[in-house]
Image (spheres, rainbow, N blue to C red):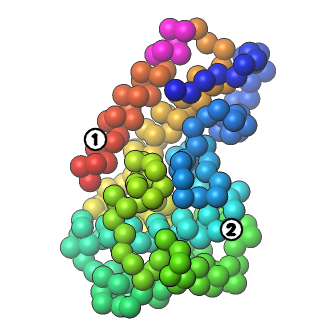
Amino acid sequence: MLSRYTTKPNIKEQSPHMLDEVSKSENIYSSPTKGLEQPISMPFARLDQGTYLHNRPETDVYKLLIDAYRLRVEDTYVFKAELMEDSIYAGCKSGRRGFRKFLRKAATIPGLLPPWWTKEKSAACEKFGMDPSQWQNLQCAVEKSDIMEHYGDRLFPMQLRMLAEAVYGIHPCGIDGTRMRRLMMAAERAEGRIIIMDVSKSRRRFYRIWAACVAVLVIIWWQWM
């Protein structure tokens, strides 16, 4: 369970930007629990702001992009019964060519890729995905359950799907993930308030129960998908 700061901040002096304040806490839950060099707090807020890939180690960005693409290929097959062009599902030895198209499309979305991204970094990302020693292997397929196990986070497939949705504009099943993203942001804010605000026990209990209910509903809905 999340804990508060040991010192009580002055509510009047709190920043209105919840994301900025919560990210400073060492106690807030970070995602994912494993698989990346540097997990982050408030991932769904960052997805909504378009900064999900920003302020991360270079290799973490590579891993996220590769797995967002690999899961998108799997989802396209599962939800649309279609084989993505230039993917291993379509008979290619690797998904490198399809992933290259994914990166090119991502580069057309303003601010989606980190400021340091260049054509050279794009090539390095492709090369990383072709390294057989890496789990993020463009020569191998991946399923939602694989993502959950590797990263130790039941909601991490949702993050990757929303990242891919930022690139393609929509989920393969035709659902716009905006409402779900906003719902997850609300849950994150509720947990964040518990950490940075000096609130009564009853209000903290309410925030925790509300956030837990939201999380359960999201998990049920996303598991069905």
Q: From the top left corner, tell me how far across and down residue 138 is, in percent.
A: 45, 80
Residue 105 can be seen in this image: no
CA separation, marks 2 and 1? 33 Å
The amino acid type, in three-letter code, at marker 2 is Glu
Q: Which mark is residue 220?
A: 1
Q: Is residue 115 above or below residue 153?
A: below
Q: Which residue is mark 2?
A: 58
Q: Secondary structure at mark 2?
A: helix
Q: Is residue 28 above or below residue 85?
A: above
The magenta span reads 201-206
Q: Residue at x 39, y 78 (%)?
A: 140
Residue 114 location, x and y as percent?
68, 65
**Residue 195 vs residue 187, the one in the foreground:** 195
Determine whether, in the image, residue 11 is placed left or right of residue 41. Answer: right
Q: Pointer 1: residues within 10 angstroms few (<14), some, or many (20+)?
A: few
Asked if residue 152 can be seen in this view, the reply is yes
* Residue depicted at 62% across the width and 48% down the height: 40
Looking at the image, is 69 positioned above or below residue 9? Answer: below
Q: Secondary structure at mark 1?
A: helix
Of 4 and 135, nearer the camera is 135
Please rate how many residues cluster around mark 2, counting C-alpha atoms within 10 Å: few if below 14, some from 14 to 19, many from 20. some
Amino acid at the residue labelled 1: Ile
**Which residue ends up furthest to the front in the rendered image?**
133
> Is label 2 in contact with label 1 (beta carbons under 8 Å)?
no
